[in-house]
Image (cartoon, rainbow, N blue to C red):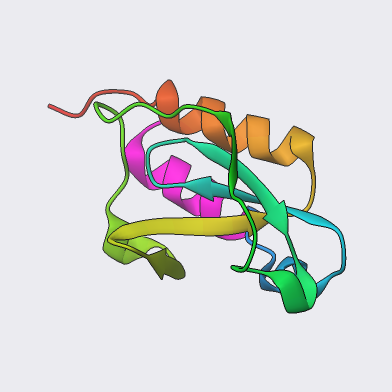
Amino acid sequence: MNRSEVLALALSLHRPDEREKEGMVYQVWEDGEITLQKGGRLFGLRTVHCIKFGSIKKQLNIADFPGQAHGHGYVFVDSHENAEKLSAAIINMEEED
């Protein structure tokens, strides 16, 4: 997948309502990192757990992401499977000439 296709995938998988649900929520960041933290009223108040490291060499433009925090872009996804799918797409993104 090229950069545009990966960004389209990220935007198609983004589920902003995930932040509001009780329980754990997945975020995928611009470099493919996957994190997990509590959602609902505890979102942002507890530890963020890194599930998978990303690749700084293969990152998307932060400004293209609907969620932004601390100089990084992210999307919420609804499952571990979708988090892994997007992370792999970012990390394995085709180089542009």
Residue found farthest to the left:
97
- Residue 85 position by quadrant: top right
For the image shown, how many numbered marks are present on the structure?
A: 0
Q: Is 29 on the left-hand or right-hand side of 15?
A: left
Q: Nearer the viewer, residue 56 or 44?
A: 44
Residue 9 inside the magenta-drawn segment: yes
Q: Residue at x 59, y 68 (%)?
A: 44
Q: Residue at x 78, y 74 (%)?
A: 40
Residue 40 inside the magenta-drawn segment: no
Q: Nearer the viewer, residue 25 or 47?
A: 47
Residue 88 vertical position relative to residue 3 in the rendered view, above or below = above
- Residue 25 position by quadrant: bottom right
Q: Quadrant of the C terminus?
A: top left
Residue 62 vertical position relative to residue 42 in the rendered view, above or below = above
Q: Residue at x 67, y 69 (%)?
A: 43
| Chain part drawn in magenta | 1-12
User: Where residue 56 sits: x, y (%)?
Assistant: 27, 30
User: Where residue 88 sits: x, y (%)?
Assistant: 54, 25
Q: Quadrant of the N terminus?
A: top left
Main SS, magenta region, reads helix
User: Where residue 72 sits: x, y (%)?
Assistant: 34, 56
